[in-house]
Amino acid sequence: MSAAACSEQSQQEKERCDIRRYVIIGSGAAGIAALESIRNADAAAEIVILSEERHGYYSRPGLAYYLTGELNESQLFPFSLRDFQQLGVHPKQARVVRILPDQHLVELHNREHLRYDRLLIATGAAAAKGDIPGASLEGVVKLDNLDDAKQISSRARRRRVAVVVGGGITALEIVEGLVAKGVRTHYFLRRDRYWHNVLDEIESRIVEERLKEHGVHIHYHTELLEILANKNQVAGVRTKDGDIIRCNLVAIAIGIRPRITIARSSGLEIERGILVDEKLQTSAADIFAAGDVAQVFDPFTGMSVLDSLWGPARHQGSIAGKNMAGAVEAYFKPVAFNITRLAGLTTTIVGTVGKGRDDDLIGIARGDSEIWRQLPDSIVAQQDFDINRLRLMLGEKTILGAIVMGDQTLSKPLHTLVAEKVDISSLRAKLLEPNAPVADLIAEFWAHRKSVHVPQYA
Ligand SMILES: Cc1cc2nc3c(=O)[nH]c(=O)nc-3n(C[C@H](O)[C@H](O)[C@H](O)COP(=O)(O)OP(=O)(O)OC[C@H]3O[C@@H](n4cnc5c(N)ncnc54)[C@H](O)[C@@H]3O)c2cc1C
């Protein structure tokens, strides 16, 4: 109803006219965090949350553990219908096909139009398909969502053979899931080691050795040329060197692309993602974007960056929601932080740790941050023992980044030391001595710095 129409209504209808209508596209980490903060700020608001996802809201990082059988399906869902009811919303399954910014409308797949006062685009990202001949055959899989994980599970059986292509965390999660199901797995790497622009050589080899111990056949310097078919089913692959491997399943994890189609067709400013300012506002009035789809301006570096991490998606959603409800709050990019598992080994990546391009990926991967690869001049302090490894990237006075593999005692302290740019000058020379007990030195330093504020991320 327009403001002019409102002015002619009864008192009761006038009150209704004052109620804002918020529409959120996407019920993932960012969309749900926005929903919570809008409701917190505006108890009377009418909120519509739309998602084309038939399973609703669930943990995408949890899919890796679902694949290995460590989590069952019900454990993936952090929200029940009752939680939605308490927030006064009924999630609606629908696909948005168009936004009409001038009319403040979104159009759904069934041609229904929904009016909004404030709109959030939180459509996430989708696995890049690449242009490999045969990629549309039955038996070619990716890992974006729960249906993909179910498809992988249903195709993964003992005595089957799979080929996994790609870099970063997702490729490894698929490899581990397949191995756990007894599938003979070939893993193709374009270069001579795994994730060379984030991990150093020792870390890559730790991961690779663990995969090999579990029977994974790693093919170095190997690229997929085409996927071979038998009656529209995967029958094998041919490599660029002409080798043929017979297999029943091909998993492609070569990176993700933000889902920007509706933003592009609505005339919003986009680059790789939807461009947003520090307040998470897009180029269009009353439209915000958050999560994997948003390319967020960082006032400190002057760059607009993509993340594909659960924590930042929630944090952005939460700030976007507040701003949609009338606050003026800037999103400050938290230090990139992820606790993940690489070949069964818990690994924390904090801050900036590497450089360059990952040839196994197109753009960014799931659970990844572009920040990890923006390393300025720095020097390495490191210590390893068996499977436990600690690598610190040291600037002049601060720790710029860290990788903690295995024993995680120091991962939270290091997160804080990096995030708070704590001055470690007094420690630097000792950390850089040959065979320095780096872990003990950091633990001791931390013990005397307990008053350091620990950042809280949603
Ligand atoms: C297998 C896997 C492993 C991961 N591992 C990690 C990890 O270890 N650590 C980490 O931090 N992060 C990890 N991530 C990434 C993390 O899950 C994402 O960063 C996070 O989910 C992004 O949240 P989002 O709300 O932006 O998008 P999503 O959670 O992707 O939600 C987007 C929603 O939008 C909906 N949507 C899209 N287009 C439309 C449309 N046109 N109309 C209606 N609805 C639409 C989708 O259906 C979906 O519900 C992983 C992700 C995957 C898939």
Image (cartoon, grey):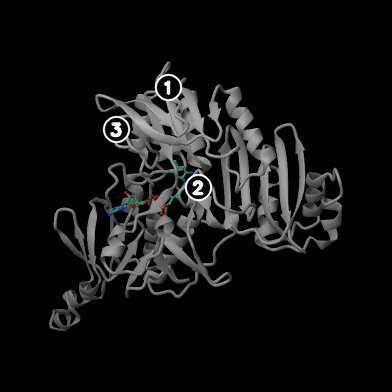
Question: In front: 2, or 140?
Answer: 140
Residue 256 position within the rendered picture, expressed as x and y whole percent measured from the top left:
42, 49
Q: Residue furthest front?
A: 242
SS assignment at label 3: loop
| Gap between marks 3 and 1 measured at Cα | 16 Å
Q: Which mark is residue 367?
A: 2
Q: Is residue 186 above or below residue 315?
A: above
Residue at point 58% right, 32% down?
Answer: 344
The response on whether ligand 1 sits within 8 Å of label 2 is yes
Q: Which mark is residue 161?
A: 1
Q: Is residue 354 above or below residue 39?
A: above
Q: Is residue 106 above or below residue 167?
A: below
Answer few, some or many: residues within 10 Å of disc 3's Cα (few below 14, many 20 plus, some between 14 and 19): some
Amino acid type, residue under disc 3 in the picture: Leu
Between disc 3 and disc 1, whose residue precedes? 3
Answer few, some or many: residues within 10 Å of disc 1's Cα (few below 14, many 20 plus, some between 14 and 19): many
Amino acid type, residue under disc 1 in the picture: Val
Q: Say which of marks 2 and 1 sits in front.
A: 1
Question: In front: 316, or 137?
Answer: 137
**Which quadrant is home to the N terminus?**
bottom left
